[in-house]
Amino acid sequence: MSKPSHELELPTTAVGLMIIAFEALTSWEQMEVLKRLSELRLRSEDEGLSEAERILASMQRVAELVGKEPVDLTSDDYRAAIRKEIERGGAGIEPLSRVMRHFGTWRMAKEALVLSGTSTARRIEARFANRRVGRIHRYSENEMRETLQRCAADLGKSPEIREFKAWRERELELAKAQGTTLYLPSLGAYRARFPHWWDVLRHYLGEDAS
């Protein structure tokens, strides 16, 4: 014999109980719950993405927020979009510093975003990696030596890795501010030839470098 409708068993699954609780909320509370669930879903999806994919997704979000095509985006647009996303209480955008650290320059990051329309993040990174390898081999031994000697002269001693990287960044920023283009071997260029930094110093600055 079937039970009267008012005696039907209530759902006992977690999903069923959540639905019952959700329906008991006010309209405003329901909207807040849906917003939080959306943020959690995005966060869960992000955890399955590579760093490049997360960054490209953030840049695409920036393009949507500022209403620009990827090729026209600027780093100022990115900063403005972060402020706008914070004001809206959105899921968040990757910090600009992380974008720059991953791709090296804003120009490279923007190029990656443009390429993401027709290529995967993995293929884009492989393309950039091949380009970096080619750039490493374009530096002559004299250029590698002169760059490290300039750094050592400015510091007054053989540079540590972090000192060389900071010095190189300052030189590039200074050249950019002056409207000139400067090419300096990166840490990767040296490490591609010598795996250990002390070998780099020994080779380019002499046996007594420390």
Image (cartoon, helix red, strand yellow):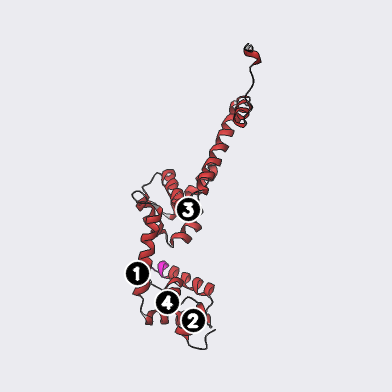
Is residue 66 magenta-colored? no
Main SS class of the magenta portion in the image: helix
Residue that label 4 marks: 193
Front one among 145 and 194 = 194
Residue 50: assigned label = 3
Q: Distance between the residues labelled 2 and 4?
A: 9 Å
* First reached walking from the N terminus: tag 1 or tag 3: 3
**Image x and y of residue 99, in percent:** 47, 57
Image-quadrant location for residue 20: top right
Q: Locate residue 196, reporting x and y percent.
A: 50, 77
For residue 180, say whether it is visible. no
Q: Name the residue under label 2.
A: 199
Q: Which mark is residue 134?
A: 1
Give the total number of marks visible in the rendering: 4
The image shows residue 134, relative to residue 66, as above or below, that is: below
Q: Which of marks 2 and 4 is nearer the N terminus?
A: 4
| Mark 1 touches mark 2? (CB < 8 Å) | no
Check the image and report above or below for 153 versus 191. Answer: below
What separation in Å lies between label 1 and label 3 (alpha carbons)?
A: 25 Å
Q: Residue at x 46, y 49 (%)?
A: 58
> Who comes first in sequence, dot 2 or dot 3?
3
Image quarter where the N terminus lies is top right
Q: Residue furthest front?
A: 1
The dot on residue 166 is none
First in sequence: mark 1 vs mark 2 = 1
Give the mark, 4 or 3, whose residue is nearer the N terminus.
3
**Viewer-closest of 23 and 60:** 23
| The residue stretch that appears in magenta | 175-179
* Dot 1 or dot 4, earlier in sequence: 1
* 3D distance between C-alphas at marks 1 and 2: 22 Å
Residue 57 appears in the rendering: yes
What secondary structure is found at the residue carrying circle 4?
A: helix
